[in-house]
Amino acid sequence: MKVAFHTLGCKVNSYESQAVAEQFLNENFEIAQFSDFCDVYIVNTCSVTAEAARKSRQMLHRCKKINPDATVIACGCFAQEAKEELLKDGAVDYVVGNNEKSRILSLIAERQQEKVLVDDLTHCTDYEDQTITNQGSHVRAYVKIQDGCNRFCSYCIIPFLRGRSRSRAQEDVLDEIKTLAENGYKEIVLTGIDISDYQKDGPKALADLIQKVNEIEGIERIRLGSLEVSLITEEFVKTIASCRKICPHFHLSLQSGCQETLKAMNRHYTPEEYAKAVELLRKAFENPAITTDIIVGFAGESEENFEESRAFAEKIAFAESHVFPYSRRKGTRADLMKGQLSKAEKANRVAQMMQTTNHLTEEFVRAHIGQKLEILVEEEKMIQGEKYQIGFTKDYVKAGLRSNKIEINKIVTFTPQNAIFAEGEWVLL
């Protein structure tokens, strides 16, 4: 039988899709392209924004158009949120929530009559056991260490769809990484919904895990998923800086550089505390990449608030910023707030913020020209009509080398002479 997957949203979703795919492979299913005529389609949905929810529904409806007799399974955050609605519209055969994905195979194999496997995760404390041994790329592997969120930012629906924060046992994480190392992976990315809350023991728990991963033979690079300001203490930074394999690339969620907006968002730090965290990282690491997420057009955000946020982004000099317009989500406090901005106003502010952050990214990338760098080669690719070996530096800048002798999954040293903007991103050459 043929099964196809389509995954929307975050790296956690990608990890979970891969874990489910491995279960199907172990039962001799053929993993096919999503556009192929398949027996089973699994769409791992996202609901972080209204647009993500719309795309999730669109992909689910596409399945029956390809094969009207196929079994279609919706899982993930949009499935958790809209289970009754999805079954009613006839495009979906099964709806599976966020703590039941490991049961998807049994739905198909045992032809179960139960159509909805969606539990209320409000008070869930159980971590769903999933594991992987291989991923699509044999270079970098994402390893999920945590699920759920306790922060309840006023704009965010995820705590209601993923449940409370819960962590994976350290032993299970390390066993999985050892297996991935044996299978040739050199780079590990520790990911989760809120890895800063790993094992709820402050910075020590995550730092201890990083130290142990640093000792695993075969692993050459360790990256971290999105971090919270509260995690970045002197003790935490000192500990991870002592780990040779840690990559100097830190995604530190900002959302806004304006204190008034941060308070309305229920983000528990000030711009000054954020800047202090960045200072600690830059003191411990030489020119680390500080990347972030920024929401513009939040409910009640004045022009002055926006300009304050933009000035703060420029002050921090982010290596890369993901800029989003605020998206109203039913069930969140922000949805009920006064001062909602129009779509046009939000789009205008996105464009202005991106003008600033794109300039900062270009400056960060160009600062690498002439420096001796290490890249982990991932693929061959044509750029402007020429063949390049493509990989990433330790601080996650894409780079290309003109050499057919370099093998995939090798760490090589080169000195870039130029930087170009190609296919929507900067590349060192």
Image: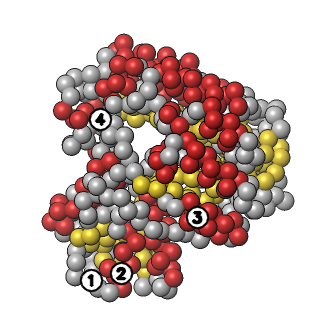
When asked about the image quadrant of residue 287, the answer is: top right
Residue, disc 1: 112
- Whether residue 56 is visible, yes or no, is no
Q: Amino acid at mark 3?
A: Glu
- Whether residue 157 is visible, yes or no, is yes
In three-dimensional space, the C-alpha distance between marks 3 and 4, rounded to whole angstroms, equals: 34 Å
State the residue in front, 148 or 223.
148
Which residue is pictured at 49% across the width and 86% down the height? 28
**Is residue 255 positioned above or below 388 on the image?**
above
Label 2: element kind:
helix
User: Which sits earlier in the primary sequence, circle 4 or circle 1?
Assistant: 1
Residue, disc 2: 106
Which residue is pictured at 41% across the width and 65% down the height? 128
- Residue 83 placement (x, y as % from top left): 22, 62
Q: How is the image coloured?
A: secondary structure
User: Which sits earlier in the primary sequence, circle 3 or circle 2?
Assistant: 2
Which residue is pictured at 62% across the width and 38% down the height? 236
Q: Residues within 10 Å of mark 4 (few under 14, many from 20)?
A: many
When asked about the image quadrant of residue 418, the answer is: top right
Seen as rendered, the residue at the extreme top is 304
In three-dimensional space, the C-alpha distance between marks 4 and 2, rounded to whole angstroms, equals: 37 Å
Q: Viewer-nearest of labels 3 and 2?
A: 3
Which residue is pictured at 46% across the width and 47% down the height? 200
Q: Residues within 10 Å of mark 1 (few under 14, many from 20)?
A: few
- Residue 171: which numbered mark, if any? 3
In three-dimensional space, the C-alpha distance between marks 1 and 2, rounded to whole angstroms, equals: 7 Å
Q: Amino acid at mark 2?
A: Ser
Check whether the beta carbons of the residues at disc 1 and disc 2 lie within 8 A of each other. Answer: yes
Q: Viewer-nearest of labels 3 and 1?
A: 3
